[in-house]
């Protein structure tokens, strides 16, 4: 007889695009687990949300909401770059993937990646790329990614 | 007494944004030195040029023309990603940098990088990033970049 219910069945998870009301569901606090992300005023959030929404399919932010508690527990984004190479091809760039520290081990990161990758494929990308820390390489490999080469950066501030 | 004129003084180089007439100046053939890039019809080129131009400052393609022969000898692009993190910050993504094989050693790559980096800074980016092969790492370091970590990819085709 099975005792206990795995966490991922106990939760009521909804995988979907970011909505403006997600600010009140911990979306910004989740991003703060990823990197520097100060509090954002409602006005600034709304402005940036509209700016990004205006890009339509060329910029999509995926979130996973635990609807049992109304909390955003995972997110990631993809934007679509249009090129002249590869027959005027498109590339999906995946950015800012993070899973809430209390919700790890439930494959939420993999679900976010699938959502973003499926989107990129559906709009005709020939590949998706992302930059990550060495320590996360194994996770992305489990999601079907391979290391290509290296990621370089130049900071202005 | 100095004998001979360095190549970069012999040429008449113009660093500027891509123009639609650059297709007839070898822009596509230059991209073919970078990667797979089939011939593009005038119609498709025009369509993609307009699509990218409509992004305004959020997508810029730099070219260097050798005006003595009307040939595009270097190029690179940058697109601006808008985020919620870092106070709704912006990141410049540099892509598709290539210098014509007959025009190397003239610091044209560095000029392209400067143009793209200056653009990213001018529109308020807090950093620029790019992915490259290990063999090009030293070049980008000379241009002020540092290796961050790794670049992952998933191909659909």
Image: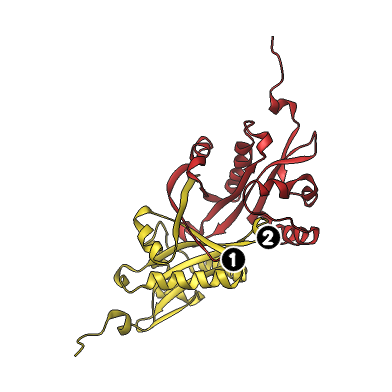
Chain colours: A yellow, B red
Q: Which residue is mark 2?
A: A87
Residue at figure coordinates x 70%, y 56% from the top left: B38
| Image quarter of residue B40 | bottom right
Left or right: A96 as drawn, with respect to B118: left
Using a 10 Å C-alpha cutoff, classify the residue at mark 2 as few (fewer than 14 neighbours), some (14 to 19) or many (20 or more): some
Image coordinates of residue B58 in percent, x first then y, are 63, 56
Above or below, B16 relative to B78: above
Secondary structure found at label 1: strand
Figure quadrant of the N terminus of chain A: bottom left
- As drawn, the label of residue B20 is none
Frontmost residue, A99 versus A87 = A87
Horizontal relation, residue A71 to residue A77: left or right: left
Can the viewer see residue B119? no
The residue furthest top is B1
Q: Where's residue B92, x and y in %?
A: 56, 52
Where residue A125 is drawn, which disc sits there?
1
x, y percent for residue B111: 63, 37
Please report the residue visible at 46 percent of the width from the left and 67 percent of the height from the top: A76
Parent chain of label 2: A
């Amino acid at each position: 007889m099975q005792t206990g219910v795995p966490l991922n069945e106990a939760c009521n998870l909804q995988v979907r695009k970011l909505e403006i009301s997600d600010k009140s569901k911990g979306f910004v606090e989740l991003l703060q687990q990823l990197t520097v992300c100060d509090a954002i005023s409602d006005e600034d959030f709304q402005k940036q949300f509209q700016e990004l929404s205006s890009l339509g399919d060329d910029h999509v932010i995926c979130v996973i909401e635990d609807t049992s508690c109304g909390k955003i527990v995972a997110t990631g984004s993809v934007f679509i770059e249009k090129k002249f190479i590869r027959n005027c091809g498109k590339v999906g760039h995946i950015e800012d993937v993070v899973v809430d520290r209390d919700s790890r081990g439930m494959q939420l990161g993999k679900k976010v990646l699938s959502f973003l990758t499926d989107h990129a494929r559906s709009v005709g990308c020939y590949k998706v790329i992302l930059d990550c820390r060495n320590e996360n390489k194994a996770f992305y490999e489990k999601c079907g990614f391979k290391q290509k080469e290296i990621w370089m950066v130049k900071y202005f501030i």
